Every structure is written in C-alpha cells, then in structure tokens.
Image (cartoon, helix red, strand yellow):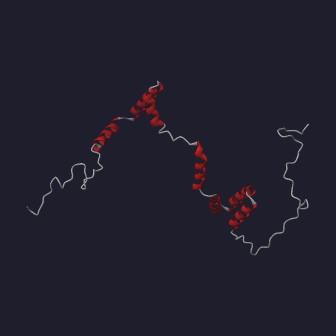
Amino acid sequence: MSEHTTPTAATTPPEGRESDGRFAAVNPFARKVAALRTALIETVTEDDMRRIAEQLVVIARLGDLAAIKLLFQYVLGKPAAAVDPDTLDVEEIALYRRGPTAQEVHEAACERLPADAVAEVLRVERPCLGAGFQEAIARGVLGTKGDGGDEEPEEAAPSPNGGVADDPRPKMTGVAPGRRGPVG
C-alpha cells in the first residue's frame, strides 16, 4: 500500500452534509424560491395588488371563511393572548417595579428642570405628601443633611384649643347629604 492517499468518497462529505457528517443548514430550494419571488414582485404592480385586495374583501363579505381568515391574518395580525384576570394585579405590580421609583423620577426632574419648574412641582407635591416625606424632599432639593446637628429644634406653636385634639368626627353644616340647600 502506498503512504499517499487520495481523497475518496469516505473522506469527502456527501452533498448536504458538513465535514463532520452533520447535516448542513442549507435549503436546496432557496435560490429557486428567491428567483420565483423576484419574478412575482417584478410582475405584480401596486394596482394589481389593490384590485386583488378589493376582490378578497368582496369574497370575505360574502361569507367565505377562508377569505375572512386570510384578510384578518394580514390586516389584523395574530390575536393577542387572552388576559388572565387572576394575575392582572401581579402583572401591574411587576410593571411598576420595572419602572423608575418615585424618588428616581423626582431626582431626575429636579436635576434637569429649571428652578422655577422645580418650585412649581414642589408647590403641587407638598400638600399631597406626609410631613416626613416633605422634609426628605426638601433636604434632597436643598442638599442639606437633616441630621439636626447645628439646628435648634423649633418650638411647637401653642394649640388654639388648649392642647385638646380636634374632634375627628364630621361637623354638621346644616346641609343634608345629597341635598344642595339647608335642611328643611
């Protein structure tokens, strides 16, 4: 036997296979399909497509289920997955968690907005927020620490009712609920 071997059928991979024997990812009809698509695109005009679409709509209106299905698939697309009402709240919370926090939004707004716009935002925000959060916002905007090191605590203003808490119950106004005039 000779030491020199010539390539044989055993060393050359069969058509459609790679050198290690695996199938090659080749579509044998890809060139043919591409040529047919090219011919179709070159042949069909916009006016042809309009007339065909109009005929499809007419056939669908007459009740042909295949025409209706084809029309819907191309006009509306695939329908969205049905919503699970049991997981709506969980999905909504997950959506909020993916977004920025209120503090991040506030900080970004304060960094990018002009001072007069920040002041306007604070005028709207303050009545809506609790006292502790208001102080934190003010410290963030003013850039102060808030550890109370150098500042003296403010003395609380005297209560006009002698320190007795206000009655939380609603007061009678002389107007019955749901009426516009005095009770009568």
Residue 45: image quadrant is: top left
Image position of 67 (left or right of 178): left
**Furthest-left residue in view?**
1
Q: Who is closer to the viewer here, 19 or 56?
A: 19
Q: Who is closer to the viewer here, 62 or 97?
A: 97
Residue drawn where x is 30% and y is 41% of the image: 33
Image position of 9 (left or right of 111): left
Residue 20: image quadrant is: bottom left
- Compared with 64, 144 (above or below) is below
Residue drawn where x is 60% and y is 57% of the image: 100
The percent coordinates of residue 180 (x first, y second) are: 85, 38
Residue drawn where x is 12% and y is 60% of the image: 5
Q: Who is closer to the viewer here, 111 or 152?
A: 152
Image position of 89 (left or right of 154): left
**Furthest-top residue in view?**
62
The percent coordinates of residue 134 (x first, y second) are: 73, 61
Residue 111: image quadrant is: bottom right
Of the 4 image quadrants, the one containing the N terminus is: bottom left
- Compared with 143, 105 (above or below) is above
The percent coordinates of residue 25 (x first, y second) are: 30, 49
Of the 4 image quadrants, the one containing the C terminus is: top right
Residue drawn where x is 33% and y is 39% of the image: 37
The percent coordinates of residue 93 (x first, y second) are: 60, 51
Number of numbered callouts drawn: 0
Q: Who is closer to the viewer here, 43 or 123?
A: 123
Image position of 37 (left or right of 140): left
**Furthest-bottom residue in view?**
150
